[in-house]
Image: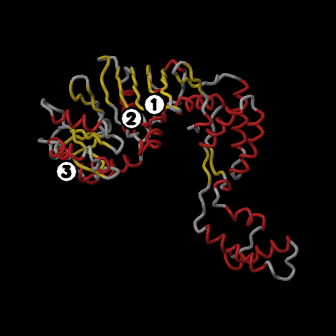
Amino acid sequence: MLNRELLRFDQRQGRLTPRFVDAGNQLLRDLARDLTGIYLASVGQSRDEIAEAVAPLINAARSPLIAKGLNKLLLDRCTFRETPEGMEEHRLAILRAAGGLLQGAGMNDLAAYRHAVARAVAEKISGSEADPDQLAMGLHADHPDRQPLTGFEPLEPEGLLHRYNLALAQGPLLWANRLTVGIVEPDPGKQRRFFRQLKFLQLLAQVTRDKEGEGGFSLELDGPLSLFDVQRKYGLKLALLLPELCQLRQWRVQAALELESRTLTFELSQASGLWAPEPRTGSYLPEEFRQFAEEFAEKISAWKLLSHTEIVTLGGQELVVPDFSFRHASGKVVHLELFHRWHARQLPARLKRLDGPGRHPPLAIGVDRALSKQPALAPLLEGSRWFAEHGFPFNQFPPVKRVAECLEGFKL
């Protein structure tokens, strides 16, 4: 992601338009290659040293703002050594040893003093004498700027420029009130992957089918600005949906942005020329989902957690994308939909639909306790017949035992 000050966009006639770069521009490719080369050669060096090495390239670039943006994306692909345990105690011991020697005889020579400190530290702490320069450099190893680079995932120059354009498009989504997303994807496998990633990101959308048999869907999602208590976390999840959209045949995003007391329209589509790499074989599975699946398979024998969830018709054109689907030994399938703390707007509509007349799909409902305790929602949950029979509260992520108990509530 790019910080607000690194985004490039135009504002004209009430519209915000990112200023994308030409990924085929040779000057920009050269800049991307040179910046990447510095990071490849900097393993073992600190953030400060890397910043010093890239500064001349950034300052000499035709557009320093673009160069800073590329550098930020490269920095995001770095892994730095974590702070050693007990660093504060280690530093205090070194300073005490240095302070004790400062007034000693012969300590007016800096080189002799540094070696004396290194010997004192070896006797009291490490057991072996360290190089005085290394000892001094490591004195503040817990400071982020002193952490050494341990790993870096490079991109080809063209790939980095495409990633830059994608980041320019992701940034404005953090200022959205609400999003309308349209997709057309005839491939059922790509459909399933997109909706699965939607749930992995814990994004709850109102989904309707546009074109029967053609893979057309419309989705309405809240924007982060409508969720003040979890704005940044939710906004990042929303931005992570954009690379998934880029994998589909046709897609569009329309959003109303609130920026500097102005309301702006923001639109993207496959015609925007954005590109994201194909997902690796086997889509990303969040750790909590993986742990839940493993524990469920280990502890629950009567039900099987299905590897793929199917889109469930709730009524009319309204659809539900469940978080999980389970098959009982009898063959009956029951779905589970989770409502997290940022799903306050969607929960009342779901309860109203399920408590209403008509035949409904076997859909269990899990509600985050932080959401269930909100003054406007607590009475709705208490008065919901469906939630009383087929729902449960949870903390962070639902426990396996509670889910199994809820599944048993459906007549088999």
Where residue 141 appears, as percent x and y from the top left, is 66, 61
**Which residue has dot 3 on it?**
405
Q: Tag 2, which secondary structure?
A: helix
Q: Amino acid at mark 2?
A: Leu
Which comes before the other along the chain, label 2 or label 1? 2
Q: Amino acid at mark 3?
A: Glu
- Left or right of 178, for residue 136: right
As rendered, which of 32 and 172 lies closer to the eye? 172
| Cα–Cα span, label 3 and label 2 | 26 Å
Q: How is the image coloured?
A: secondary structure
Where residue 360 appears, as percent x and y from the top left, is 16, 32
Q: Is residue 125 above or below residue 49?
A: below
Q: Is residue 13 above or below residue 127?
A: above
Which comes before the other along the chain, label 3 or label 2? 2
Identify the residue shown where x is 42% and y is 42%: 228
Where residue 195 appears, as percent x and y from the top left, is 36, 32
**Quarter of the image containing the C terminus?**
top left
| Cα–Cα span, label 2 and label 1 | 9 Å
Where residue 334 appears, as percent x and y from the top left, is 21, 39
Would you call the spot at circle 2 few (<14 residues within 10 Å), some (14-19), or many (20 or more)?
many
**Quarter of the image containing the N terminus?**
top right
**Which residue has dot 1 on it?**
244
Are the two marked residues, 2 and 1, in contact with CB atoms closer than 8 angstroms?
yes
Identify the residue shown where x is 69% and y is 34%: 67
Q: Quadrant of residue 102?
A: bottom right
- Badge number at residue 198: 2
Identify the residue shown where x is 32% and y is 36%: 308
As rendered, which of 339 and 188 lies closer to the eye? 339
Q: Is residue 360 above or below residue 372?
A: above
As rendered, which of 395 and 38 lies closer to the eye? 395
